[in-house]
Amino acid sequence: MKPDASAPTPADLSAARAAADGFLHAVMTGDEAAARVLLMTRDGESLDFKTMHESTAGYELGPAKADGAQVVIIAIVRAAPGKEAPPALPLVLARENEAWKVDMGASITKMLGVNLEDLVKQMAQGLGDVMVTGMQAVAEGLSSLSKGDGQAPAEAPRPKAKEKPKAAKKRGKK
């Protein structure tokens, strides 16, 4: 059986681990420019670097493991005092222009077990379906009004005003 030409070699695993280490070190030390060089982003993706930097006190990297053409490295992130960090972050690294870079979108998808882009699309579709159903109901209601006698619906009867309680008869002493 021939090895997969796109599968990472031991040298690739080492280079990917170095990229992950460089990325997390840049985050921890506040070097956004260095972190962004090691980060793969797609249109529409953003990264809250400031929050990542402020919440990261340290990290440890597990071994680099091939996952198809990608490399996955589990990072144990230590949170800064008073901050929160994920207990274990699977960093997904992929090749971009021959360099290994952290694919943050794929990393978050792997961590959550859900593709966020697909989830947002499904939520938008569901919201759109609900809006269409609601607008159809409004259109049907308006249509039924116009098919009537052309008159606006009669005003609903007003509730009767409450009568004032009759004064109780005074009983005097006799």
Image (spheres, rainbow, N blue to C red):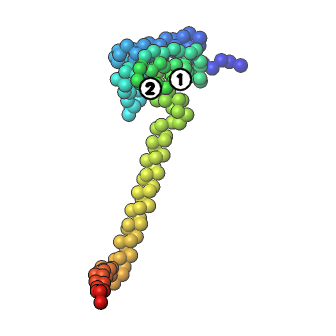
Compared with 96, 42 (above or below) is: below
Dot 1 lies on which element? loop
Q: In x, y percent, where is residue 125? A: 45, 49
Res. 92 visible in picture: no
Report whether 155 appears left or right of 25: left
Compared with 137, 67 (above or below) is: above
Q: Quadrant of the N terminus?
A: top right
At label 2, counting other C-alpha atoms closer than 10 Å, the crowd grade (few under 14, some 14-19, many 20 or more) is some
Q: Which residue is mark 2?
A: 84
Q: In x, y percent, where is residue 53? A: 38, 20
Q: In x, y percent, where is residue 103? A: 47, 24
Report whether 70 appears left or right of 164: right
Dot 2 lies on which element? loop
Which numbered tag is attached to residue 152?
none
User: What residue appears at the point 59 percent right and 24 percent down from the top-left corner?
Assistant: 68
| Residue type at numbered disc 2 | Glu
Which numbered tag is attached to residue 88?
1
Q: Quadrant of the C terminus?
A: bottom left
Question: In terms of image quadrants, where is residue 8?
Answer: top right
Q: CA distance from mark 1 to mark 2?
A: 12 Å
Foreground of the two, 96 or 38: 38
Compared with 11, 121 (above or below) is: below
